Image: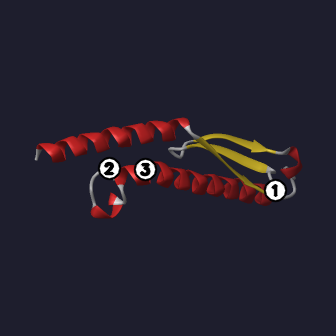
Amino acid sequence: MQQIMQQAQKMQQQVAQAQAELAAAEVTGSAGGGLVSVVMTGLGEVKSVRIDPKAVDPEDIESLEDLVIAAIRNAAEEQRELTEAKMGPVTGGMGGLGLPGF
């Protein structure tokens, strides 16, 4: 039982370290050939949005809105892949076991 507790504590430390690394990491998503880009933390917090002036057309705001959404989705996908890369080795695929925090 003590060995299981030690393994659980070690895993908890590894999860905390992976979460800290994710918080410090940044990913970038873009759309429209780079006309819109979004920087997001590894935890999914949007840090910045950059819009190239060429993307701004007062007659076509809907296209710009679509580019922003596409860039956010692209960044979110990058963030998801980063999370899997950082957390996968720590949790060892335990996500499907219904364990809290995994």
**In the rendered structure, which disc, 2 or 3, sits on the residue that comes first in sequence?**
3
Residue beneath the point at 43% across and 41% down: 19
Q: Secondary structure at mark 2?
A: loop
Q: Position of residue 4 (x, y in %)?
A: 17, 47
| Residue linked to disc 3 | 87
Residue beneath the point at 47% across and 48% down: 86
- Vertical comparison of 6 with 84: above or below: above
**In the rendered structure, which disc, 3 or 1, sits on the residue that comes first in sequence?**
1
Q: Is residue 2 left or right of residue 93?
A: left
| Residue linked to disc 2 | 101
Q: Secondary structure at mark 1?
A: loop
**In the rendered structure, which disc, 1 or 2, sits on the residue that comes first in sequence?**
1
The nearer-to-camera label among 2 and 3 is: 3
For the residues labelled 1 and 2, the Cα–Cα distance comes to 37 Å
> Could you tell me the amino acid type at mark 2?
Gly
Q: Quadrant of residue 45?
A: top right
> Could you tell me the amino acid type at mark 1?
Gly
| Residue linked to disc 1 | 33
The nearer-to-camera label among 3 and 1 is: 3
> Could you tell me the amino acid type at mark 3?
Met
Q: Position of residue 21 (x, y in %)?
A: 49, 38
- Vertical comparison of 81 with 10: above or below: below
Residue beneath the point at 28% across and 62% down: 97
For the residues labelled 2 and 3, the Cα–Cα distance comes to 11 Å
How crowded pointer 2 is (Cα within 10 Å; few <14, some 14-19, many 20+) is rated as few
* Closest to the observer, 78 or 89: 89
* Closest to the observer, 73 or 2: 2
- Vertical comparison of 92 with 46: above or below: below
Callout count: 3
Most extreme residue toward the left, as rendered? 1
Q: Position of residue 43 (x, y in %)?
A: 50, 44
Most extreme residue toward the front, as rendered? 3
